[in-house]
Image (cartoon, helix red, strand yellow):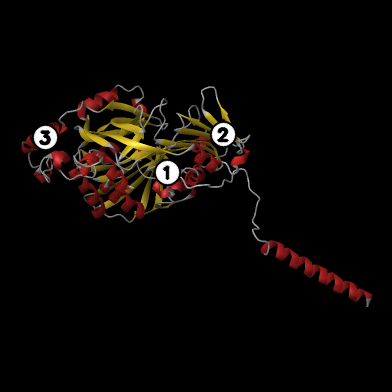
């Protein structure tokens, strides 16, 4: 009897304990999990738009190989560029075979075969690219990095060949199967008929004539220090305010630090408490970087992931430690210098955890205050400037950009068109500025067209294709008036002489 009573009491106590646990977990008002790691942050206020990974991974250019030695180049985010990239992004590539890059005569293929070449300006992990494109291969393939995708067709057999180039330059992967057809490739190549003619200079392509560009004055707004502090520190009450010898404002909670530079226009955030390790996965770090920016400041315009390499480092793990995103305005990447930082975000990570974060506090207005038509040099003028560069053998990309400088006494930035190059380590340099104000680039292009037309007229059996040089196409009259979304002079043509440069920037994004 006593044993039964004890058992009943024990059962009752167990039931009461379970009821109490249930009540504590689900009945207490305002009961929430309070355990928080020091790397979990509270978003006090949404500061800027968020982005997905597929919005920041895209080629820096698309080269159209027209055959017969003719080429044209598309730059983001113009219409023809988007049409080509989105189509290729949606198709599948399967069954890759790895071969030495020297097994093929790429110069001959470039000059004679019609095709499309997607250039990323650095090594992109295939594991990252496969999140946006249908790439199926073995583990060795998925562990590599690629810098180019080259698709061309054999006119005799109408077979389409697709190659992915390893970033080390030693290997290429040929796809055994692809959903692209010869008709697709021909359609892409036809876009080049309306574009500026380009010629190969080393590893890059340069225009044969000057191209139209835009100089702009653009106002900006600035986030407040309190906004960024609230975004990066979960408990702002524990932070202290300091000033360094240069008068820069610093917030710290004893571990992490947030420093404001350039009169509050640039921040440097450090978190030395993050784990220090030699193991780094680039794909993991890029994905973590996108999420971190989404939560802490957002994206002030279109950005592209640019692979960078730490100076003096040869370790493969260090390749993914630094993640950098370059900002665009319209179809122009933005360049700055150490004296005035702007136009990029840079993060350092360890195993997906951010240890350093640099970015601008300024957000450019969508509509420019003013704009002026300028011309960037092409032909021999540009070629000679490239030959003067000490590191010309390291160049992996040539592109039109905008050099950013502040306007004294006003919240306005001056964006001046320049030619720029990117080196293999990810660093960039302005090569040459625009031609003087008032330069008649349209006249230069008419003269070039006339010379090409005369040359084609004296060439036997060239037919309607002439020499294959796209500048001689007469679809839209004079070369400066043809409809072209593809070449780098497109932005100002699409805007028109009375419109605003930033209008295209808004629509493109």
**Mark 1 vs mark 2, CA separation in Å:** 22 Å
Residue 351, picture quadrant: top right
| Position above or below: 106 against 10 | above
**Mark 3 vs mark 2, CA separation in Å:** 59 Å
Q: Residues within 10 Å of mark 2 (few under 14, many from 20)?
A: many
Q: Which residue is mark 1?
A: 299
Q: Position of residue 452 (x, y in %)?
A: 11, 35
What residue lies at 22% left-to-right and 27% top-to-bottom?
Answer: 435
The disc label shown at residue 409, or none:
none
Q: Residue furthest bottom?
A: 1
| Position above or below: 36 against 467 | below
Q: Is residue 314 visible?
A: no
Compare marks 3 and 2 and give the one earlier in the sequence.
Answer: 2
Compare marks 1 and 2 and give the one earlier in the sequence.
Answer: 2
Secondary structure type for disc 3: helix
Quarter of the image with the N terminus is bottom right
Secondary structure type for disc 1: loop
Q: Which residue is mark 2?
A: 251
Q: Position of residue 376 (x, y in %)?
A: 23, 31
Labels 1, 2: front one: 2
């Amino acid at each position: 009897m006593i044993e039964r009573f004890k058992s009943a009491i024990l059962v009752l106590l167990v039931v009461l304990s379970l009821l109490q646990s249930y009540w504590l977990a689900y009945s207490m008002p305002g009961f929430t999990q309070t355990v928080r790691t020091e790397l979990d942050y509270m978003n006090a206020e949404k500061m800027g738009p968020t982005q997905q990974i597929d919005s920041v991974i895209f080629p820096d250019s698309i080269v159209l190989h027209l055959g017969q030695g003719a080429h044209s180049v598309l730059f983001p985010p113009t219409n023809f560029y988007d049409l080509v990239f989105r189509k290729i992004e949606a198709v599948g590539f399967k069954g890759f075979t790895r071969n030495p890059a020297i097994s093929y005569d790429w110069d001959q293929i470039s000059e004679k075969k019609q095709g499309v070449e997607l250039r990323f300006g650095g090594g992109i992990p295939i594991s990252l690219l496969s999140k946006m494109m249908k790439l199926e291969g073995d583990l060795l393939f998925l562990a590599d990095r690629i810098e180019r995708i080259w698709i061309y067709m054999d006119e005799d057999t109408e077979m389409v060949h697709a190659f992915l180039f390893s970033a080390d330059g030693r290997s290429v992967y040929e796809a055994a199967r692809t959903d692209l057809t010869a008709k697709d490739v021909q359609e892409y190549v036809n876009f080049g008929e309306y574009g500026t003619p380009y010629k190969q200079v080393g590893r890059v392509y340069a225009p044969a004539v000057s191209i139209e560009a835009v100089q702009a004055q653009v106002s900006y707004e600035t986030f407040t220090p309190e906004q960024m502090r609230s975004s990066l520190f979960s408990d702002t009450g524990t932070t202290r305010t300091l000033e360094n010898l240069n008068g820069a404002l610093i917030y710290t909670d004893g571990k992490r630090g947030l420093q404001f530079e350039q009169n509050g226009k640039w921040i440097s955030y450090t978190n030395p408490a993050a784990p220090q390790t030699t193991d780094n996965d680039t794909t993991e770090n890029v994905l973590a970087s996108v999420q971190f920016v989404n939560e802490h400041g957002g994206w002030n315009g279109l950005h592209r992931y640019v692979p960078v390499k730490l100076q003096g480092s040869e370790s493969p793990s260090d390749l993914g430690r630094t993640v950098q995103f370059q900002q665009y305005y319209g179809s122009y990447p933005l360049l700055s210098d150490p004296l005035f930082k702007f136009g990029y975000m840079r993060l350092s990570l360890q195993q997906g955890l951010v240890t350093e974060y640099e970015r601008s506090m300024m957000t450019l207005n969508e509509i420019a205050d003013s704009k002026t038509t300028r011309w960037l040099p092409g032909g021999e003028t540009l070629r000679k400037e490239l030959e003067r560069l000490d590191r010309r053998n390291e160049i992996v990309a040539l592109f039109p950009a905008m050099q950013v400088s502040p306007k004294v006494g006003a919240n306005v930035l001056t964006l001046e068109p320049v030619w720029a190059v990117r080196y293999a380590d990810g660093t960039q340099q302005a090569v040459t500025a625009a031609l003087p104000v008032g330069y008649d680039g349209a006249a230069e292009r008419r003269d070039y067209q006339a010379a090409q037309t005369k040359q084609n007229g004296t060439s036997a059996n060239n037919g309607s294709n002439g020499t294959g040089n796209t500048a001689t196409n007469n679809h839209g009259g004079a070369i400066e008036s043809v409809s072209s979304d593809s070449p780098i002079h497109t932005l100002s043509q699409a805007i028109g002489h009375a419109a605003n440069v930033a209008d295209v920037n808004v629509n493109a994004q």
